Image (spheres, helix red, strand yellow):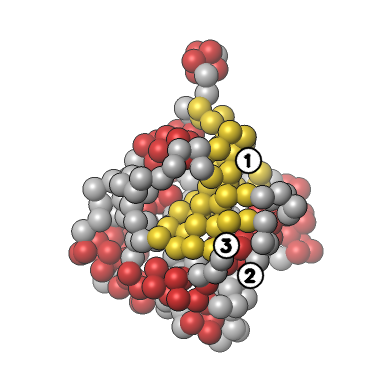
Amino acid sequence: MDFHQNDLSAEKIRGYIELRKKEQRLFPDEWVMHLPKLPRESIHHEEWKIREKSMQRLLNYLPANKNLEILDLGCGNGWLANVLAKNTNYNVLGIEINDEEFAQAKSLFTSNNCKFLQSDIFNENFELHQFDCIILNASIQYFPDPVQLIDRLLNLMSEGGSIHIIDTPIYKSKDVSAAKKRSREYFEKMGVPGMQYHYFHHSTEMLRPYDYDYLYFPGTKLRRFFQIFSGPDSPFPWIRISGRKSAKQNDA
């Protein structure tokens, strides 16, 4: 999780942590160390089997024998950064803003090629064009302005690098209003109504300024066919952004 862009009050972060606790998503260290594998006793066991598939697609995509600088933005408890850093060719930086999950990530997974930083991506003075791969794994929904965020990340991306939005709901414009209503009702039910103001429903319109493609798209007939044999898979797309469109492309 990351609250950014003037959205960093202690009250908002407390609301997020309170929700995570009620959802039973703050795992003990012994569970986090083995993620994405979760014990069957967890109510999120089946969900994490799906997240494991998303992780495996990412691992299959990344070149195993190439030195990469990777940013995991909104890294939470650090599980994905840890998995990536098992490849010693990768240097991984995880950024997280909430105290509880940042402390867990730093304590469990810090190594020579896996570091963690508690910071706002907009305030930290990063070297430009530093990262070959920037990952937003279930985190972009906590940023109010995705275009501002992506533009910032493009400045940090190396030549030939890419930004990856994974396991995140991205809506058609016509579906945003209904999604907001569902979220509002859910947060009220969970006793954290203030979260409706800090959870953002982004549409595919946010992608218009960019060169992007889908590396995984759910719901196609072929995908549904394969799920008969492989079981449930992520309902969310994997989007790769490689840069901003040129003026000529925008005019097309």
SS at badge 3: loop
- Percent x, y for residue 1? 40, 60
SS at badge 2: helix
Q: Which residue is mark 2?
A: 49
- The amino acid marked with disc number 1 is Tyr
Q: CA distance from mark 3 to mark 1?
A: 29 Å
In percent of the image, x 66 and y 50: which residue is there? Answer: 67
SS at badge 1: strand
- In the shown orientation, is residue 5 left or right of residue 137? left
- Percent x, y for residue 105? 46, 71
Query: Badges 2 and 1: C-beta atoms under 8 Å apart?
Result: no
- The amino acid marked with disc number 2 is Lys
- The amino acid marked with disc number 3 is Asn
Q: Which residue is mark 3?
A: 113
- In the shown orientation, is residue 240 left or right of residue 229? left
Dot 3, crowdedness within 10 Å: few (<14), some or many (≥20)? some
Query: Badges 3 and 2: C-beta atoms under 8 Å apart?
Result: no
Of marks 3 and 1, the one in the foreground:
3
State the image quarter where residue 227 is shown: bottom right
Q: Counting residues from the N terminus, which is met first, the one under dot 3 or under dot 2?
A: 2
